[in-house]
Image (cartoon, helix red, strand yellow):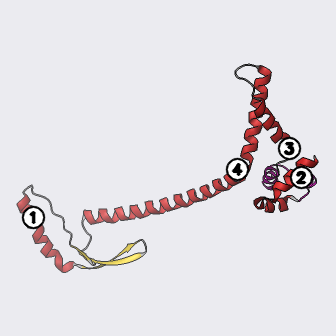
Amino acid sequence: MVVGLIYTEIDGSGDPKGDLATIKTTFVQEIPSVGPVQIDLNGHVETTFTNQAGGSFLKAITSEIQQLRAETKELREESRSQKEEIRDLRGEVTVLHPLRDSAIGIRKRWFGVFCKHRRRGGKANQAVINRGNKIAHSGDITTDVYLLENGHMHYFHAFNVLYGVDWHLAKTLISMFILQVITFHWLVLY
């Protein structure tokens, strides 16, 4: 499809029939000035046929197109920035996810012990306290690997002694369920 546009502006007289007649006359007068115009539509060049863009309407359209292009560029940059931020947040969630259960268990224990000693505002749940004690005082190879990997602790040698495996190898094995056996072995020995 090829687009053709003849544009004209007149000072309106308030008489619709008279204005229409004037517009038709100026259209006819503008026909000889119609020629090809290249329009860039986001990298795709189209050819249209029109008269010179001397009027305010066509200038306004051209200005609007430029503004839309600038806004599109700005939105693309913002979108790219947000995608990077989302990628970073996903990475952080991946790092923190294994720590979630340990953190919750230990914090529940802390509040349970507080309630037990205070004996106000709630009854201490000994099962919650016991689970929190087990989490706090038992080995958790997955949590420890994530803490070492992300620089939250630096007990590399102690990790090797406790679990009998280098933390890098443990990281590789985590997805293979072999660590369940190693953790069980550690719990039985200690």
Q: Earlier in the sequence, mark 1 or mark 3?
A: 1
Q: Which callout, 4 or 2, points to the residue nearer the camera?
A: 2
- x, y percentage for residue 22? 9, 66
Q: Quadrant of residue 12?
A: bottom left
Q: Which callout, 3 or 4, points to the residue nearer the camera?
A: 3
The three-letter code of the residue at mark 4 reads His
- Locate the N terminus and report the quarter of the image it occupies: bottom left
Q: Sort mark 1 into few (<14), some (14-19) or many (20+) by Cα contacts within 10 Å.
A: few
Q: Earlier in the sequence, mark 2 or mark 1?
A: 1
Disc 4 is placed on an element classified as helix
- Which label number is shown at residue 138? 3
Q: Which residue is mark 1?
A: 20
CA gap between label 1 and label 3 equals 90 Å
Q: Sort mark 2 into few (<14), some (14-19) or many (20+) by Cα contacts within 10 Å.
A: few
The three-letter code of the residue at mark 3 reads Ser
Q: Which residue is mark 4?
A: 97
Disc 3 is placed on an element classified as loop
Q: Which callout, 2 or 3, points to the residue nearer the camera?
A: 2
Query: Above or below — where is 133 with respect to 141?
Result: above
